[in-house]
Image: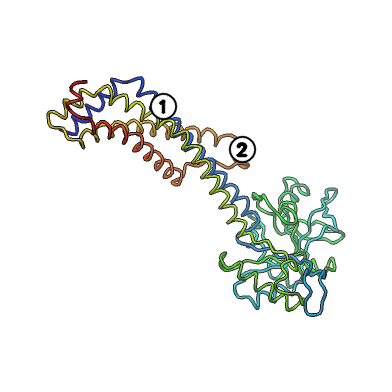
Amino acid sequence: MRLVDAVRQLWSDLSAQRLRTVLTILGITWGTVAVVVLLAFSVGLERQTIKRFHGLGDRIVVLFGGRTTLAHAGFREGRTIRLREEDARILARQIPDITMISPEYSTREAPVRRGRNGVNPNITGIHPVYGEMRNVIPLPGGRFINERDLEERRRVVFLGDEVARVLFGDADPVGEQVRVGDSPFTVIGVLQPKIQNSSYNSRDEDRVFIPASTHAALFGSRFVSNLVYRTADASRTEAVEERVYEVLGRKYRFSPRDEDALQVWDTAEWERMFGFLFLGFKLFFAIVGSFTLSVGGIGVANIMYIVVHERTREIGIKRSVGATRRSILWQFLAESVLIVAVGAALGVLVSAGLVKVVSLFPMNDIVGTPVISLQVAAVTMALLAFVAMLAGWLPARRAAALDPVECLRH
């Protein structure tokens, strides 16, 4: 019964100041909406950016030749280092942490035609493992380059989805013939459309892929454009990079300390940098939202100070009939917490509605879909709990500290 009486008393006290209570609740609601929506957008943008980044590949390292800047072993600086296909085998053999590796030839020397339709794409020669590393996934009914294609130097081609659209329109290209330069090639698959926001030669949708052996024979390529490899663990990429410089440094006679002799793009490192960047975004949004929420907290504290002042005599009567300081403190603290809780509940409902409406607009491919994740909910609840305790604790302490005799004289 004491709990029921306390709830009734609480409701009665808040109802007596209905307008001020409603306005204060709306302040908390608006602050909650600001925090939740800003954080939801930051989570959606982060997920969309990572999704786009993984269109390039998951945990891959792209290795290019460079130009030496240090004299070494009797050779002057300024030598150009150009990689060969055999370097992929050497690195795979001598560095066990490299689990997958593929050379990559690239050229635009020949057009790709079908009838009157033609394009001038990046013609890329690779090994079969390249597809797995780079997330090059075929549409159902087709396939990617396999080992027999590589061993037999088959004239087969895997088309980027945009290239396939230009050459074949809505028709199914698999099994059809195209010409790469003057040579006929059989289409074995088409790229499943994917989101890709970065590349180092061209987007995969605008490429055609052929076996590396076929590419070398057709175009007479002596050097590869680059090597692509993946390590067993993303945390080992820096150690593997040092070994790559050592192994290739011995072969091409450059110093392992000469960082410009090779160019390395570690996508795992870039992904970690993106992680720190978006952590900063989240902290910024949380701070901005917390400022808005603090305005609502000030409103709660203000109304509670007014309530304490208006009910000074009531506090004196309760203390005179046996109420303890603790019971007075918890009474006023409960009122402030209830105000914050009601405002927070309304804010979460409004935020969920806004997020749902925004997700219907055709801009998700750019900024992502805002998400009220567990992370967002946890941060919001932590901020609300802090505001509730801070806004309610000071007025409640003041009420509990009042002298009963002075209260009865009020």
Give the camera-side residue of 399 and 288.
399
Q: CA distance from mark 1 to mark 2?
A: 30 Å
Quadrant where the N terminus sits is top left
At which x and y percent is residue 360?
Answer: 56, 35
- Residue identifier under label 2: 363
Question: Is residue 308 shown above or below 177?
Answer: above
Q: Amino acid at mark 2?
A: Met
Reading the chain from its start, which is encountered first: label 1 or label 2?
Answer: 1
Q: Nearer the viewer, residue 156 or 366?
A: 366
Q: Residues within 10 Å of mark 2 (few under 14, many from 20)?
A: few
Within the image, what quadrant is residue 124 found in?
Answer: bottom right
Instruction: Give percent across and percent down for residue 292.
Output: 47, 33
For residue 33, above or below residue 43 = above
Name the foreground residue: 169 vs 395: 395
Tell me which residue sits at (33%, 20%) in the image: 18
Amino acid beneath label 1: Leu
Outermost residue toward the right in this view: 182
Query: What residue is shown at x 12% (from left), y 29% (from top)?
Result: 321
Colouring convention used in this rendered image of the protein: rainbow
* SS type, badge 1: helix
**Is 201 on the left or on the right of 293, as rendered?**
right
Q: Give the residue pinned by disc 1.
A: 26
**Dot 2: what SS?**
loop
Picture quadrant of residue 191: bottom right
Q: Is residue 82 left or right of residue 62?
A: right
Q: Residues within 10 Å of mark 1 (few under 14, many from 20)?
A: many
